[in-house]
Amino acid sequence: MTSRAATLTVLLALPCFAATYSADVRPILEARCVTCHQPGAVAPMPLRTYAEVRPWAKSIREAVAARAMPPWHAAPGAAHAFRNDRALSPREIETITGWVDAGSPEGKPVPLSAASASAPGWRIGKPDLVVQVPGVQVPKSGIFAYTFVIVPTHFEHDTWVRAAEFRIDQRATVHHMNVFVREPGSSYLAEFPRNQIFVPTVSERGKKRAGEAVFARRQLLLGYEPGYDPSPWLEDGAKLIKAGSDLVFEMHFSPNGTPAVDHSEIGLYFAPKAPAKRILAIDTLRDLDFEIPPAEGSYQSLATMTLAAPARLLSIQPHMHVRGKSMFVEAKYPNGKRETLLDVPRYDFNWQTTYALREPADLPVGTILESKAAFDNSVNNKYNPDPKATVHWGDQTTDEMHIAFLELVIDAKANPETLLAAPPKMVGEPTKK
C-alpha cells in the first residue's frame, strides 16, 4: 500500500466532525458576536440563544463565509497585531458553515450564560460618574446641523479617567457623538452658555486665540460612531480632566422619518490613582484641503504629522463619509524604516472600527505619521449622493472628511503641547486656494 493510500484510509476511518450549537457554535458567537447582537445593542437581531440563532442560520453562514461578519476591515500584514481583532479564523468559519450544512443541530441544551445574558446597559461596568445629554430634539426629516452642549464637571481636583463609555439613547438617529474636555480658560466655544443646547457656525467652532496651545484649547475624550465598542484604554494609563474643566458634547443626528428626543449618556470610570502614562486622543492627522472632482473614482488624499516628542501608538480609527473607499496609515521612522500601521482596503462608513493595538507601538522623536485616503465620487459608488458634485471637507454625510483618529501614550508628567512638530490647522480656518 502506498503512503498516499494509507493516509486516505486513515482519513476515511476518522469520524466526521459534527458541530452542534451548544458545544461548538455558541462559544464562537459569544466571543465574537453577542456583544453587538443583543437587545439594545447596535445589531438588528439578538443571537444569545439557540432559539434566537436558529432562524438566522443560513444568513449567518453566508455572512461568515463571505467574511462580512463579524465586521473587521483591516487587511492582514500590519506591523502590529490588534487586541480587538474580530475576524474569524478559518477553523471558526468552517465550524459555523459545517454546522449549518448539517442542519444546525442544537446538541445538549445549555442555560443562558452570563456573557449572553448581559442586559443592555454599561458594558464596562457601573460608572463612577454619568453625564446625560439634556434631551436633544431630533426632527423627522431635514438636515441636522452639528449641535453642542457644554456640561461643567465641577471637579475640584485633577481627575484621571481610565475608561469612558457611551450609552446611546436614540441609536437609529445618532450619526456620531464626540465629547471633548475643555480646560479652564480655553477659547473653544467660550462665547456660548453652559447647560444649553446650541448650534454654532463652523467659524465659531474654529475660533481660537492667537498662539493658543492645541491641547489646552480642547482634547477629545471619546467618540461614538457606528461600530463603537467600549473598552478600557490601557493598564496604568488614563486620560486627564483638569480641575474646573467642562465636557463639550458635539452631536450629529440623521433624521430617519420619526421624530425623537435623545438622552444619550457618557459614563466615566476614574483611575484609583494618578497613572504612569497619559493617553491623548488626537484628531490632527487629517486633510482639510482636499477637493474631489466630479465623477472621480479614485481620488487620493494625503495627511501627515510629525512627532517632536516620543510617544506610543495605542489605537487608530479611520473616518471618512460615504465616498470613502480606503485608508492606509503608515509610520516613517527617523532611521528610514517604514511600517504599515493600518490598511483598510474597503472602508465601511456604517461600521467605523477603532483598531486597538495589542501592544502600543513605539514612535520616537521625528516619526512621521502618514494617512492616505481614497474616495470614490463616481456613479459606481452606490452610496454616492451626487457624482456631479465637487466635494470638500464638511459636516454632513453629503460632504467628506479624512481623519485618522489616533490615541497616543505619553509619560503622565510630560507636556502634551511638545508632542506635535507643527500646530495643526483647525476646522473653520480658511481653505487653501
Image: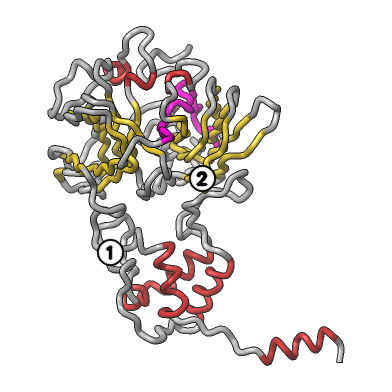
Q: Quadrant of the N terminus?
A: bottom right
With 25 as the anchor, is 185 left or right in this view?
A: left
Asked if one can make out residue 402 in the rendered structure from this viewpoint, the answer is no
| Magenta stretch prevailing secondary structure | loop
Residue 312 forms part of the magenta stretch: no
In the image, residue 101 lies at what x, y percent? Answer: 51, 80
Determine whether the residue tagged by mark 1 lies in a helix, strand or loop.
Answer: loop
Q: Is 78 located above or below residue 286 in the figure?
A: below
> Which residue type carries mark 2?
Leu
Q: How much space separates mark 2 and mark 1, taking CA atoms? A: 26 Å
* Magenta span of residues: 276-297
User: Which residue is pictured at 13% across the width and 39% down the height?
Assistant: 135
Q: Is residue 67 left or right of residue 199?
A: right
Tell me which label, 2 or 1, sits earlier in the chain. Answer: 1
Q: Which mark is residue 118?
A: 1
Reading the image, the residue beneath label 2 is 357
Question: Could you say which is closer to the camera, residue 267 or residue 85?
Answer: 267
Q: Nearer the viewer, residue 278 or 28?
A: 278
Relative to 194, does residue 236 appear above or below in the rendering?
Answer: below
Relative placement, left or right, of 355 versus 230 is right
Number of other residues with Cα within 10 Å of mark 1, as a class: few under 14, some 14 to 19, many 20 or more: some
